[in-house]
Amino acid sequence: MNFSSLVGFAMAVATVWFCVINESPNPALLLDPKGFVLVLGGSMAAGLIIYPVKTLLRLWKVILFGVIFKRAHNRRKIVRELVAAAALDPSEHPALMMYGTSHPFLAEGLRLIAEDALNVQDLQDVLTRRSMHFKQTYMQDAKVLATLAKFPSAFGMLGSTVGLIDMMTELGGEKGQAGIGPAMAMALVATFWGLVFTYMILMPLSDYAVRLAGEDALIRNIITDGLVMIKQHKDPHIVLEKLNGFLNIGERMAIKNRETMEGATWEQVRDEIERLRKRA
């Protein structure tokens, strides 16, 4: 679960509630449903005009599985799993079919190696194309969110404009100037909700989707490079040193001895290798 994003949204709600709505002399005015419905309904209508329903419904997956239930992938663990697989003899590669990994893309690539139906170039092409598909999907979600972020503020201004027209219409009535203040406040409620939807929800989600695309692309590049080297039967030392380039200095690992895998750092690697060999 992505606690950082959840805390951020909770802080946004708390800030609006305690610093704006709770401190308002008339909180009920800010909670008036007309301005809220105008902004939300208008933005949804604009979104439906631009995008098909299927595209908009996919945004819920971004929120649920990208923000709320996002599973963080440990790059160091992925590198360790790749090095363990590289330490196997090619005759033991069928065991990779049952290798339980920390990333589904890694499991998919190991299955392709275990099936041994693709050469090195074909394997690299397949993995690169599938990786690009995910990146394009994430970037498309970010673009949709950025497009939708333009509308709440616009419909908020629309609500304010309509409220001002009504206020000016009533200016010569019985209430006269006494009604200007309340009418003006009501006119700006829609603008308030438009700003909330734009700058506290949609724009942060759009930037988050862009960051998610970059992080996912990096993980898939690590996996692709590692799988290609496994297919090429590269030495585990070479696999590790090349994949270490994707890790921070404090995360990098080292093999002291290929045969014995000496060092406490590699106890987990040895366990994974033995587990794979038992399945071979």
Image: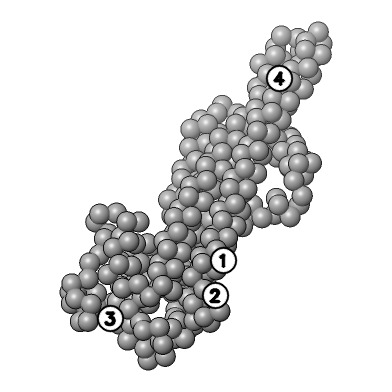
Residue 78 spot, x, y in % from top left: 38, 67
Question: Which residue is painted at 28% across and 77% down in the image?
Answer: 268
Residue 72 spot, x, y in % from top left: 43, 60
Q: Amino acid at mark 2?
A: Leu
Q: Which mark is drawn over residue 270?
A: 3
Above or below — where is 124 with respect to 275?
A: above
Disc nearest the viewer among 4 and 3: 3
Query: Disc 4 designates what residue?
Result: 183
Q: CA distance from mark 1 to mark 3?
A: 30 Å
Q: Is residue 17 visible?
A: no
Q: Amino acid at mark 3?
A: Arg
* Front-most of residues 259 and 273: 259
* Front-most of residues 19 and 71: 71
Element class at badge 2:
loop
Q: Is residue 47 visible?
A: yes
Residue 267 spot, x, y in % from top left: 24, 78
Disc nearest the viewer among 1 and 2: 2
Q: Residues within 10 Å of mark 2 (few under 14, many from 20)?
A: some
Q: Are circles 1 and 2 on residues that touch, CB within 8 Å?
A: yes
Question: Which residue is painted at 37% across and 62% down in the image?
Answer: 75
Q: Residues within 10 Å of mark 4 (few under 14, many from 20)?
A: some
Q: Which mark is drawn over residue 211?
A: none
Query: Disc 2 designates what residue?
Result: 118
